[in-house]
Image (cartoon, rainbow, N blue to C red):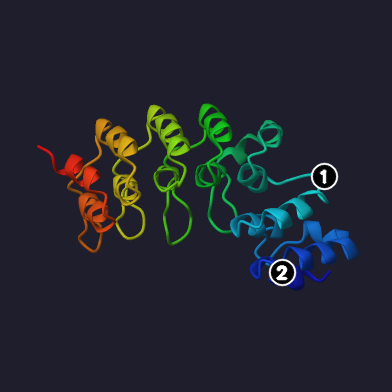
Amino acid sequence: MDRDALLTSIKNRDPAAAKALLRNQPELSAARLDNGLSLLLVAIYYGQQEIVQAIRSGRTELDIWEATALGELPSVKALIGEEESLVDAVAADGFSPLGLAAFFGHLEVLRWLVDNGADVDQPAQNEMRVRPIHSVAAHRKAAVALSMMQALLEAGAQVNVAQHGGWTPLHQAADHGHQPLVMLLLQHGADPTARSDNGQTPADMARAKGFDDVVAFLESP
């Protein structure tokens, strides 16, 4: 199998090359890196939807991390139904199913995982130490982020935990200028005076991006 060529096409964002490889070698749809991470998941990380679809069309089964990253709830339910421990299983790159659902903004999958016992405070097993709440706070779609955050907080997620670099969820929300999310986090006890490893508060991050309304809210008495 020409796995490396498919990997290169993903990194180069070249769907035509990827599709040609998959046509000639359909078995490449199941290809994995040496650490076990699938090229389907790599393509999802790179945001290459055409390549993702091309690889996915050649697969009849997914692993739990592929299923959550794709947001395919029926597959998630089936996999965890067969093996309950998969709910908190860690992928080769350190991420849990809940972490992936949070990162990619799959609200229904996230809610189902939370309702079925996923550890809402499980950090990624890599140097970033990102928890699901950090990924949610950094999500670009405001309405999705707010709904996911509500689900995590209702499930008891810790609000002041820091990832690598000392960034809390409130830092992330402020950095994105997401005032409703900032308000929600504060309502659940987020600390507006928390400082990252480089000394920044959430207000400092909002100020640097020109989000003056968020700064005013964070610094109000």
Q: Picture coordinates of residue 205 (x, y %)?
A: 26, 55
The x, y position of residue 199, in whole percent, is 20, 60
Could you say where residue 111 lies in the image, as x and y percent from the top left?
Answer: 53, 30
Q: Is residue 117 left or right of residue 15?
A: left
Q: Position of residue 167 (x, y in %)?
A: 31, 54
- On screen, residue 205 versus residue 125, left or right, reads left
Which secondary structure lies at badge 2? helix
Q: Nearer the viewer, residue 183 or 98?
A: 183
Q: Which mark is residue 60?
A: 1
**Residue depicted at x 84% and y 65%:** 20
Type of amino acid under label 1: Thr
Q: CA distance from mark 2 to mark 1?
A: 22 Å
Please identify, in this view, whether the residue under mark 2 or under mark 1 is nearer the observer.
2
In the image, is residue 172 above or below residue 98? below
- For this view, does 68 lie left or right of residue 140? right
Q: Residue sitting at 64 percent across and 68 percent down?
A: 11
Amino acid on which the number 2 mark rests in the picture = Ser
The quadrant of the image that shows the C terminus is top left
Among numbered discs 2 and 1, the one appearing first in the sequence: 2
Q: Please say if the residues under marks 2 and 1 sit with CB atoms less than 8 Å apart.
A: no
At a point 45% along the width and 46% down the height, the residue shown is: 139
Residue wearing tag 2: 9
User: In the picture, residue 24 is in which quadrant?
Assistant: bottom right
Residue 190 found in image quarter: top left
Residue placed farthest to the right in the image? 24
Q: Secondary structure at mark 1?
A: loop
Q: Using the image, determine if residue 177 lies above or below residue 199.
A: above
